[in-house]
Image (cartoon, rainbow, N blue to C red):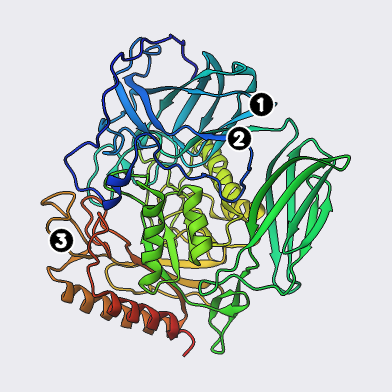
Amino acid sequence: MAAALVVPVSCSKKPSWKPVEGHIMTRWAQDVNPSSPLPEYPRPSMVREGKWKNLNGLWDYAIVPAGEPAPEQFQGKILVPFAPESALSGVGRKVTPEDALWYETSFSWKKGEKTLLHFGAVDNEAEVWVNGELAGSHSGGYTAFTLDVTPYLKPSGKQTLRLRVLDGSDDGRHPRGKQVLDPKGIWYTALSGIWQTVWVENVPKADITGYTYVSDIVDGTVTVTVNANGGDEVEVCSEGVSVTAKPGEPAVLAIPNPELWTPDSPRLYDLSISLKEGGKTLDSVKGYAALRKISKCRDNDGHLRMALNGKPLFQFGPLDQGWWPDGLYTAPTDEALRFDIEKTKAFGFNMIRKHVKVEPERWYYWCDVLGMLVWQDMPSIADNSGVKWDYIGYDGTFWDAPEDIRETYYHEWGEIVSQFKNHPSIVVWVPFNEAWAQFDNEKVVAFTRELDPTRLVNQASGGNYVKGCGDIYDYHHYPNPEFAFMEEDQVNAMGEYGGIGFPVKGHLWNEDGNWGYIRYESSADVLNQYTEYARMLKDLIRQGCAAGIYTQTTDVEGEVNGLMTYDREIVKMDEAALREVNLSVIAAMNR
């Protein structure tokens, strides 16, 4: 993907930033500071107190044909980390598969022993230059990547950073979720480029590169394995307890008076991790852990249920697309990111299914803090001439995926599971949605379990089904909840239902042409239908249903079946009544 590097002539006049007009916005758009958008520390699971700098802000950009060299002149300013297709970027331009998106910025920095450049996520293929030299590349639009840029930095002063990005969107051969170049119905505006925070930090030459942990709720222990470059010992501390181990080997912490993490009481334990050599501390980070177990059990009637910390719990929540009218994939502020989770919890739900999208790490952090269970989907592979989605049915055949597609899938799904498995909120991995580019259920489930044996695996939410594969049999039925059949030896989940449409004037992405599985024109009618579907779901619970997912959290573009409008201003039902209904559904399994 390398291209000739031409030093551009930057725009001499820096235009002021303003959002692109034309669609509704959220209330948080007015809080976006173009000098410092999304300034929060982006990696709350591993905080290093050394020198770091957030590089979000106004960068130069250009969109040119993909086969051409770097532009000699940029076309304007873009607000990073908002994609150029979004309103908050200040650009509002589509990037096609035939385009290359170029970025450039400069920042003042004094390099340390080692300087790391971090990208939260860039969609989809990125090459990175530092001071004119190619520093590295990454492919995959949903995971973070880090480059050691020490060799390319000047000792101090102005440093120049440049990116070249390619994105095939729905004409590519990579995971893209619900992004399409021609949005309509359940498909939404494609986005490209940087959509999460960019930041730089100085670290010691011998540094901590990450850690993983596993909790044991019976023994009250947290086993932490720390990965590092260099050092001969790691020390892990929590709650006044300190243990040591070698890098890459487990350190077992016995937590005094252990408390378990639940949605009602999301107890987190701070971790302090130090890397040492000969007793001298070389590097240190802060993180957190939780005591939490997800498993399966039989109830008194013999139905297989999901158990949280050994106790059956009906998991109930909305399908959450994670889209924003002003930022598309990117919430305008951290407060906005937290709002959706808080509101979902206030509605009485205890779970969110994050649908064919991966969020910034701070979203999972807030789920950990607030006490929200998460089912995490793998974003679906693109649908084009080489990749056909073929919905056969629950006993259907599977797609014979080309080898390059398989390699891309395993690589990116592996990165997603590995990067987010420290978050206690995540309790279920969902490798496929329906039959969207679905292949090799058994191999994919085994791959997922090898990466993380501590969580349940839903082989395919609503997709082609292999009996006995994974932990969950997941059925989709719209608009009412209904099963074709139930399995005795797997957890039965109503993976999608609902989709009650209600277009609220003044809060619509489009004035007309809006869509829902069914449609009403009043809040009272929506509540009545929602309540009736809840009654039907309770009947299914008594027959063995162990989880339910309602479509969906918010409207998204022309899809108006959200519990809230796309701008998050209107809740479409009486909130107290909605909460009462939802709590009664969760309680129904234990009656």
From the viewer's perspective, tell me whether residue 512 is left or right of residue 149.
left
The alpha-carbon separation of the residues under discs 3 and 1 comes to 54 Å
213 or 124, which is in the foreground?
A: 213
Location of mark 2 (residue): 51
Numbered circle sitting on residue 546 = none
The alpha-carbon separation of the residues under discs 3 and 2 comes to 47 Å
Circle 1/circle 2 CB separation < 8 Å: yes
**Residue 157 in which image quadrant:** top right
91 or 395, which is in the foreground?
A: 91
Q: Residues within 10 Å of mark 1 (few under 14, many from 20)?
A: some
**Residue 117 in which image quadrant:** top right
Q: As shown in the figure, which amino acid type bears the numbered disc 3? A: Val
Numbered circle sitting on residue 504 = 3
Q: Give the image location of residue 142, x and y in percent.
A: 47, 42
Numbered circle sitting on residue 112 = 1
Q: Give the mark, 3 or 2, whose residue is nearer the N terminus.
A: 2
Q: Give the mark, 3 or 1, whose residue is nearer the N terminus.
A: 1
Position of residue 259 relative to residue 396, above or below, is below
Q: Residues within 10 Å of mark 3 (few under 14, many from 20)?
A: some
Nearest to the eye among marks 3 and 2: give it. Answer: 2
Q: Give the mark, 1 or 2, whose residue is nearer the N terminus.
A: 2
Position of residue 551 relative to residue 109, above or below, is below
Circle 3/circle 2 CB separation < 8 Å: no
Q: Residues within 10 Å of mark 2 (few under 14, many from 20)?
A: few
Q: As shown in the figure, which amino acid type bears the numbered disc 2? A: Lys
Residue 458 appears anywhere in the view? no
Q: Give the image location of residue 183, x and y in percent.
A: 24, 43
Position of residue 159 relative to residue 168, above or below, is above
The residue shown at (62%, 23%) is: 111
Q: As shown in the figure, which amino acid type bears the numbered disc 1? A: Gly
Tag 2's secondary structure? Answer: loop
Residue 352 appears anywhere in the view? yes
